[in-house]
Amino acid sequence: MDKALIKPFIAKRVAKELHDGDVVNLGIGLPTLVPQYLPEGVELTLQAENGTIGVGTLTEENKDPYYMVDAGGKPTIAAPGGSYIDSCTSFGLIRGGHVDATILGALQVDEKGNLSNWIIPGKMVPGMGGAMDLVVGARKTIVAMEHTQKGNHKILKNCTLPYTALNCVDMIVTEMAVIEVTPEGLVLTEYNPEFTVEEVQAATEATLIISPDLKPMC
Amino acid sequence: MAKIVTIEEAVALIPDGATIMVGGFMGCGNPLKVVKALAESGKGNFTMICNDGSMLGGPSGEEFYGVAQLIHNKQIKHLIASHVGLNPEVATLMNSGEMKVTLIPQGSLAEMIRAGGAGLGGVITPTGFGTLVEEGEHIAGQIEIDGKRYLIEKPLRADVALISGYRVDKKGNIWYKGTTRNFNLPMATAADLVIVEADNLVEVGEIEPENVMTSCVFVDYIVDGGNA
């Protein structure tokens, strides 16, 4: 698949998982592309863990970088009808199950739905920020990522990097497939017709259970 | 009732080696002028509880934005934070052993500070269960309640909290603007000494009681940030 098309392709598929009125937290990078692919009539309330509920449209006129930033430290603004809250309230919202979905990237996901995305010991130690709370608290955790990392498996039998949280991932969307995490293991529900099911399995260390309703993506 | 002091008097209240809390998120909501004065004071050996190490490159091109200056100056011996990825100097100092870094999930950190200010013995949270967080010094144990497993996080308090308020009245009541409420709100309750930098120092009554976000009873000293 053309490299430039991968992220929009994944974002477009993730967008179909969201419902009108959902409260959603988006991780940095790929997940921030999701809103532009929402189906007609679907409006989300985007939540940023540092204290915005209902993210609005930023312009040169309304931007106020000393007072309003998003979870990446970049300027943001609350939409009309939105609100600003403190960090305790924000994480109460997150842990308390008031966020319908969190969409984020991963370094590794395994067949039990365990997630590793916050540290590569000795190499990259940025800290977990709000990720551990988000994946534990959100009603649905969707991992949106490229299927492999430079040819290396990311969807594993067991994560080898330190966990972000256990049994937290509900769905994995990549440029090759849509995979649902179930108590029985990883179920392949959709595949990108540019690839064969065998190719999807070969790019996945964990054994995929093929859904009886397997269908093409998008 | 809080006392209005100069920025020099405020810095004089912060002892070397103190545990300090600094409100803000990626620099947004750091009390910028007090932090700058502290950075220039030559004091150090601080344990700093702050959500992050701020970042290099502030909104107006500040080389070291907010608390990033304290880290750059090596005034912090121990940083307790949730995210340090936007300030690469943190990793450098951590790897060289010049600064100890304790990472705590952001929601737990916020709630541990709230617990510290609210007289609670800890926080029982599902966050971090089964992860490296379990090994932290801030963990008091684990507990199972109704079949669900939780970590018990200890409360956090500090000697001094440095808070930023957009509008602060002369008694010390605070109104926060935008996303700056973040950690400022809980931190204002969780230190022995609370110093607020008022971006706009206003008369008592100008903030309606309904709109006071942090009551003056939590605040000890006010520094006029001079924007009013």
Image (tube, coloured by chain):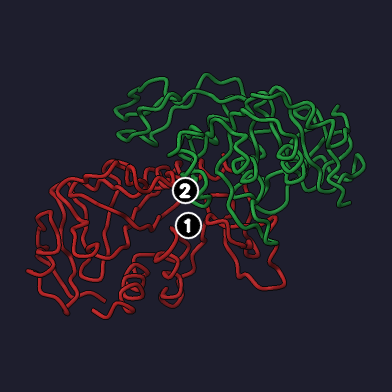
Q: Which x, y percent locates residue A101?
A: 40, 56
Q: What kind of element bears circle 2?
A: loop
Residue designated by label 1:
A23
* Mark 2 or mark 1, earlier in chain: 1
Dot 2 and dot 1 within a common chain: yes
Q: Is residue B149 above or below residue A122?
A: above
In the picture, measured across the screen, residue B179 lies left or right of residue A44, that is: right
Q: Which x, y percent locates residue A100?
A: 42, 54
Query: Looking at the picture, which amino acid does disc 1 mark?
Result: Val
Q: Badge 2: few (under 14), some or many (20 or more) residues near its Cα, within 10 Å?
A: some
Q: What kind of element bears circle 1?
A: strand
- Location of residue A87 by image quarter: top right
User: Which chain shows up in red?
Assistant: A
The residue lying toward the viewer, choosing from A121 and A93, is: A121
* Chain on which label 1 sits: A
Q: Which x, y percent locates residue A48?
A: 53, 55
In the picture, measured across the screen, residue B71 lies left or right of residue A163, that is: right
The residue lying toward the viewer, choosing from B125 and B82, is: B82
Query: Looking at the picture, which amino acid does disc 2 mark?
Result: His
Please report contact status of discs 2 and 1: CB closer than 8 Å, yes or no.
Answer: yes
- Location of residue A14 by image quarter: bottom left
* Chain on which label 2 sits: A
Q: Which x, y percent locates residue B190?
A: 65, 27
Marks 2/1: CA–CA distance? 7 Å
Residue at (60% x, 47% y) in the render: B25
Residue designated by label 2:
A98
User: Which chain shows up in green?
Assistant: B
- Location of residue B134 by image quarter: top left
Residue at (47% x, 48% y) in the render: A98
